[in-house]
Amino acid sequence: MNDLTTMKLNMDPLILLALREDITGEDITTNAIISKASTGEVQLLCKENGIIAGLEVFKRVFELLDQTSEMKTTFKDGDAVKKNDLLAVVSGDVRVLLSGERTALNYLQRMSGIATYTQGLAKLLTGTKTKLLDTRKTTPNMRIFEKYAVKVGGGTNHRFNLSDGILIKDNHISAAGGVKQAVALAREYAPFVRKIEVEVENLEMLAEALEAGADIIMLDNMDDASMTRAVQIIDGRAQSECSGNITEKRLIEIAKTGVDFVSCGALTHSSPILDLSMKNLRIL
């Protein structure tokens, strides 16, 4: 099952929540201006260059308000778009087009911004072994959309949620009494098919994680020299990931350390939106 199918299977309840947030009773302005059903169409325009992501979500907003709504487009998620491109034409009940506009744009602008920013960072890693990962630092109730957008932009998803993978962090280690104890407890509790990832902050903790048999080791907030040494020590006995203070300027140097993965929370918590607009509404 691909990422788009998974998102489509799960998106309706989340979109409905967003619509209910914006329309608690009625759209007073629209209902005042347009007293009865009338058919119209409106254009979706691009106002800056980027990568489009979330067209199915955008369309679904209008379909959930009125199943007869339609969208025509020649673009697909992942396409590069340019300023002034006509991305789509949405048609249907004019009241639906007006009431759904902001929610639909919120999704599409947010997801396209993430895809655009992700692609820019992923390109910096071209030709290296290092893969770009997202994190769980997502907007509440937006994770399925934001992680999908990361994939559209050329990034790779880390675990989706707490049920999706084992990641032993500093507070888990403190609660367990040490790295070895935490790994042993996780291995005893979890199904054998689950990999165990451990976050380490220094080379001493790294040695403990390797001795405990961790499958993946996250190098947290290490400088480049320490990461290089850590990757040498790991020497293929586990996969390596780095996190913490990941910036565009550091990515190329991080890749030189030989680390397998770099996780970047900024992909979802700091990406600017892609500027899009619905314009030129007309009654048919």
Image (cartoon, rainbow, N blue to C red):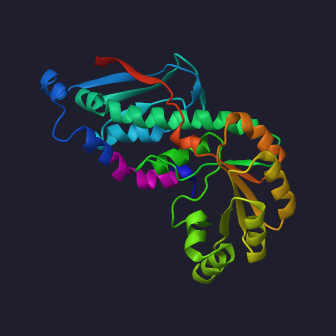
> In the shown orientation, is residue 228 left or right of residue 268?
right
Residue 52 in view? yes
Determine the image quadrant of residue 128: top right
Q: Quadrant of the N terminus?
A: bottom right
Q: Is residue 8 above or below residue 47?
A: below
> In the shown orientation, is residue 235 left or right of residue 67?
right
What is the x, y in percent for residue 150? 58, 44
Q: Quadrant of the C terminus?
A: top left
Q: Main secondary structure of the magenta part?
A: helix
Determine the image quadrant of residue 62: top left
Q: Residue furthest bottom?
A: 188
Q: Residue at x 43, y 41 (%)?
A: 57
> In the shown orientation, is residue 131 left or right of residue 170?
right
Q: Residue at x 21, y 26 (%)?
A: 38
Residue 78 in view? no
Q: Which residues are magenta?
A: 5-16
What is the x, y in percent for residue 65? 27, 40
> In the shown orientation, is residue 134 left or right of residue 87?
right
Question: In this orientation, which residue lies closer to the viewer: 5 or 157?
Answer: 157
Q: Residue at x 63, y 46 (%)?
A: 264
Question: In this orientation, which residue lies closer to the viewer: 17 or 177?
Answer: 177
Question: In this orientation, which residue lies closer to the viewer: 163 or 174?
Answer: 174
Q: How many marks?
A: 0
What is the x, y in percent for residue 50? 58, 27
Q: Is residue 122 above or below residue 273?
A: below
Determine the image quadrant of residue 108: top left
What is the x, y in percent for residue 75? 54, 31
Say if the magenta span includes residue 192.
no
Q: Residue at x 51, y 60 (%)?
A: 161
Q: Is residue 47 above or below residue 161?
A: above
Question: In this orientation, which residue lies closer to the viewer: 43 or 167?
Answer: 167
